[in-house]
Image: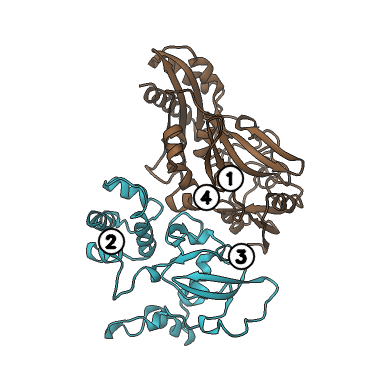
Amino acid sequence: MPTKNDDCSMPMTSLEKLSRRAFLARAGAAGVVTATASVAVPMASAASAQQQASTPEPATPDTVPIALRVNGETYRLQIDSRATLLDTLRETLHLTGTKKGCDHGQCGACTVHVNGRRANSCLLFAAMQQNAEITTIEGLGTPDKMHLVQAAFVEHDGYQCGYCTSGQIMSAAAMLHEPWGPSDSDVREALSGNICRCGAYPNIVAAVQSVRRRA
Amino acid sequence: MQPFELITVNSVLDAVRAQAASPSAQQGAQVRFIAGGTNLVDYMKLNVETPRQLVDINGLSLDKVEPESGGGLKIGALARNTDVANDEAVKAQYPVLSQAILSGASTQLRNMATTAGNLLQKTRCVYYRDTAFGCNKRQPGTGCPAIGGHNRMLAILGTSDQCIASNPSDQNVALAALEATIHVTGLKGDRAIPIAEFYTLPANAPERETVLDAGDLVTHITIPPLPAGTKSLYLKLRDRASYEFALASAAIVTKKSGDRIEFIRVALGGVGARPWRSFEAEHSLHGKAATPANFRAAAEAALRDARPQSQNGFKVELAKRCLVHALTQATA
């Protein structure tokens, strides 16, 4: 379904016209089995932003109608009450910048901001977040206009595989407004809820400290 | 995850009535309050908890941290762990509580988790979380594979032949040492329960963890004022420097008169089947001089009844040293 942040509509260089996600989706449609394509089972059916004014989809027994505020947009959705905010962001709104790592609140890959505070979206039921203002990595900055923390991660090479990066950045961006001391160890403590399997921690700390020293 | 109905309530009484439809407030309750959800949602994903209805209580105005008229502090059940830890009155009057909360979980989880949710987080082990195994807590009568199994992290105090899980909370260790009172509204009205009487031991019924009955809603806790000049601190020892459960921890609340210990409250974490108030250590220290020998004697008293398992014998000495170190710091 089309959203403002669909991968295909994001600005890309000429060499990147076809995104990895779009490529995998097409490969899946062509009969090539890929793990990424085959596990994308939507937890919920959705009415897109464009359908907001029209009649909502008919309710099915296990679904509930909700309104969700994400990155300044209001989405009216019909979702399974079991759907987490993480699954709703990724599978229904197709905001796939937020990652699913452990799905149990242990790794931090799914970190988003809820009313300006960082939270694990895998442990939040979407239906309980209707009065919240949610910000994902897509709402933090864009490739053309990056958030300071995003730019610092690029500058300091604060990643290897990149899977934990959006969670790291969302945590770091929230940390700027939290009461922490100035040292590297304060950054490590503040970001201890975000695990990096590659071990890019030295560069992550350097990136975050470069932003904090500038502030 | 099993399907469930999600309802919201606008009053404490509505919340109490909704939960009272479940025969129990303990393991396996069919109706569950949900606030932060950091513990419950995890168990629902694992099919360890399968409520048919969730009662969202976030709309209840129970999130304030306020001074009590006679001194002390009142903390609402829905006050988030982050907000309590960073509260100026908490930091000034009860540093042990702020330190304990900040030593637990991650910022993301502390932003979500509530005071009462932390109070009621499960006493648990890896087998409780895994439905492929038996577990007397999750399903009474199915055994305890932790006994003789993977038990390095588990309890050495207050356990039984039915369950050796440790209470993982840091907040609750501080609250035990601060002699907090848990305020509950239930079907029969309001109750005030001293934290020392709030948690039950596993004995023959590990599925029960507290004295709460069906319908009971924790509305707030109160912490009594401390004598002027009282010092408090929390020391936590663990495998990693951050974001890890305690192997052993100690909460100390104390005041000296000259070199003598005039006021002393001690609670241990990571070693007990519940947040472990050590009356033995307190009795041993009261009126004594603040010396290494007296601290060691108190630690010996605190761990006298320790019952280590196959992998966690090291916790006995670790907890003693943790307590000695914390006492040394608190009386310095």
- Position of residue B319 relative to residue A68, above or below, is above
User: Given this view, does label 1 or label 4 mark the residue nearer the observer?
Assistant: 1
Residue that mark 3 sits on: A82
Q: Colour of chain B?
A: brown
Left or right: B168 as drawn, with respect to A185? right
Chain in cyan on the image = A
Task: Residue A53 in the image: state x and y as whole percent.
Answer: 57, 83
Question: Which type of secondary structure does the marked residue at label 2 adopt?
Answer: loop
Residue that mark 1 sits on: B77
Question: Which type of secondary structure does the marked residue at label 3 adopt?
Answer: loop
Q: CA distance from mark 2 to mark 4?
A: 29 Å
Look at the image and tell me in which quarter the C terminus of chain A lies.
bottom left
The chain identifier of the residue carrying mark 4 reads B
Out of A73 and B247, give the one closest to the viewer. A73
Q: Earlier in the sequence, mark 1 or mark 4?
A: 1
Q: Are marks 3 and 4 in contact (CB under 8 Å)?
A: no
Q: In the rendering, which numbered label is found on residue B113?
A: 4
Task: Residue B98 in the image: state x and y as whole percent.
Answer: 44, 38
Q: Earlier in the sequence, mark 3 or mark 2?
A: 3
The chain identifier of the residue carrying mark 3 reads A
Task: Residue B288 in the image: state x and y as whole percent.
Answer: 45, 12
Out of B67 and A1, give the one closest to the viewer. B67
